[in-house]
Image: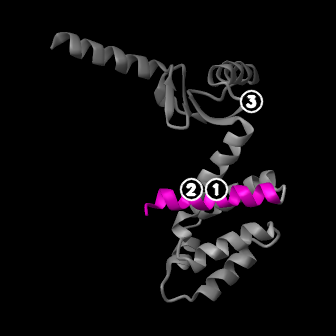
Amino acid sequence: MSDQVVAKRYADALFVLGQEKLSLDKFVEEFKVVRQIFEDNEKLNTFLFHPGINKEQKKLLLTEAFQGMHQDVVNTLKLLVDRHRTELIPSIIDHFVQVVNDAKGIAEAYVYSVRELTGDEKVHLKAAFTKRLNKGSIQFTNIVDPTLIGGVKIRIGNTIYDGSVSGKLKRIERNIGTANN
């Protein structure tokens, strides 16, 4: 079974658990912190993957490291240690956040621009894409990318809306290349 299928199954189970306990928002908030820690801390990953360290030591570290978080969040991490699935933690969290957002009618968008967008620009983009995608709301993460020259590029899921100057120049170049052939 592929890792993506396994990650999705864990994410779906977490979604059901979060609904039952009325803790979806808390789970999303805490799992985003967990994902960031796993992505930023190579030593944690090395420790959890090390075959010479037993599961109990790994689970003890997770209990101490994530002290203060919802017990179900910590228990999920410990379950993944037991099942040798810690490498899937970031993927499981991504799937979980996506399932929660889909259930709430929220889309997550990454907006690439030459400079930080102003409040008005964000409001206009949100309004336009909320209507275009028929979503309840959109959460934007603005990423500054000076290579765009101008304009914006927006990634929502697997779809990219490229309104950047560099994107337009690449399209023109492709069209000229196909016209000459």
Say if mark 1 contacts mark 2, CB within 8 Å. yes
Q: Is residue 68 left or right of residue 44?
A: right
For label 2, the residue is 8
131 versus 34 height, above or below: above
Residue 13 is one of the magenta-drawn residues: yes
Q: CA distance from mark 3 to mark 2?
A: 23 Å
For label 3, the residue is 136
Query: Is the stretch drawn in magenta largely helix, strand or loop?
Result: helix
Callout 3 secondary element: loop
Identified by mark 1, the residue type is: Asp
Callout 1 secondary element: helix
For label 1, the residue is 12
129 and 64: which is toward the camera: 129
Indicate the position of residue 123 as horizontal and vertical percent values. 74, 22
Say if mark 1 contacts mark 3, CB within 8 Å. no
- Frontmost of labels 1 and 3 is 1
Q: Which residues are magenta?
A: 1-20
Determine crowd level at label 3: few under 14, some 14-19, many 20+ residues with C-alpha closer than 10 A.
Answer: few
Name the N-terminal-most of marks 1 and 3. 1
